[in-house]
Image (spheres, helix red, strand yellow):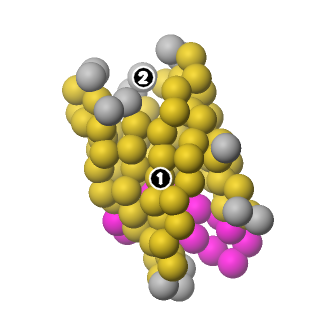
Amino acid sequence: MSDETYNLVISTPMGDLEGSVTLTINGGALSGTFAFMGGKQPFSDGTIDGDGNIAFAGDIDSPLGKMPYSVSGTLKDGKLEAAARTAQGNFIIKSK
C-alpha cells in the first residue's frame, strides 16, 4: 500500500483553481482524499489498473453546496491527468 499526495490545477468554467488529492493504492483498489474549492472529502471504491488508468467518485462540500463528481484518467510517471464530471460541467485535472 502506498500514499501519494498530488497538487493539482483544475480547469473549471470559473477558471483554473488549485486543489490536491491524496491517493492510497492497494493493489487495484484506490481510495484517498480530494480537496477542492475549500472542501476536503474522502473517497473509496476507486480503481487503478496496471496501465495507470484510474477512476473514483464522491461528493465534495464546496461554496456551491455538495457537489457529486466522478473522475477518470491516468496516473503515469508521477503525473496525474484526468477529467472530473460534475453537475457544473467537466473539469480537467492535471498535477503540477
> How far apart are labels 2 and 1 at the CA level?
20 Å
Q: Position of residue 43 (x, y in %)?
A: 34, 59
Q: Are marks 2 and 1 in contact (CB under 8 Å)?
A: no
Q: Kindly tell me whether residue 91 is visible in this rendering.
A: no
Q: Position of residue 69 (x, y in %)?
A: 40, 41
Q: Which residue is drawn at the image coordinates 56% and 47% (left, top)?
A: 7
Give the vertical position of 78 relative to 6 (above or below): below
Q: Is residue 17 left or right of residue 66?
A: right
Q: Position of residue 49 (x, y in %)?
A: 63, 74
Q: Is residue 51 magenta?
A: yes
Q: Kindly tell me whether residue 13 is visible in this rendering.
A: yes
Earlier sequence position, callout 2 versus callout 1: 1
Q: Which residue is drawn at the image coordinates 30% and 38% (left, top)?
A: 39
Magenta: main secondary structure:
strand
| Pointer 1 residue | 21
Image quadrant holding the C terminus, namely top right
| Pointer 2 local density, CA inside 10 Å: few below 14, some 14–19, many at least 20 | few
Work out whether residue 48 or residue 23 is closer to the camera in this orientation and state it.
23
Q: Which residue is drawn at the image coordinates 37% and 56% (left, top)?
A: 33
| Pointer 2 residue | 88
The amino acid at mark 1 is: Val
The amino acid at mark 2 is: Gln
Give the vertical position of 61 relative to 16 (above or below): below
Residue 36 found in image quarter:
top left
**Range of the magenta residues?**
44-56
Give the vertical position of 34 relative to 89 (above or below): below
Q: Position of residue 52 (x, y in %)?
A: 68, 68
| Pointer 1 local density, CA inside 10 Å: few below 14, some 14–19, many at least 20 | many
- SS label for mark 2: loop
- SS label for mark 1: strand
Work out whether residue 15 or residue 50 is closer to the camera in this orientation and state it.
15
Q: Is residue 1 magenta?
A: no
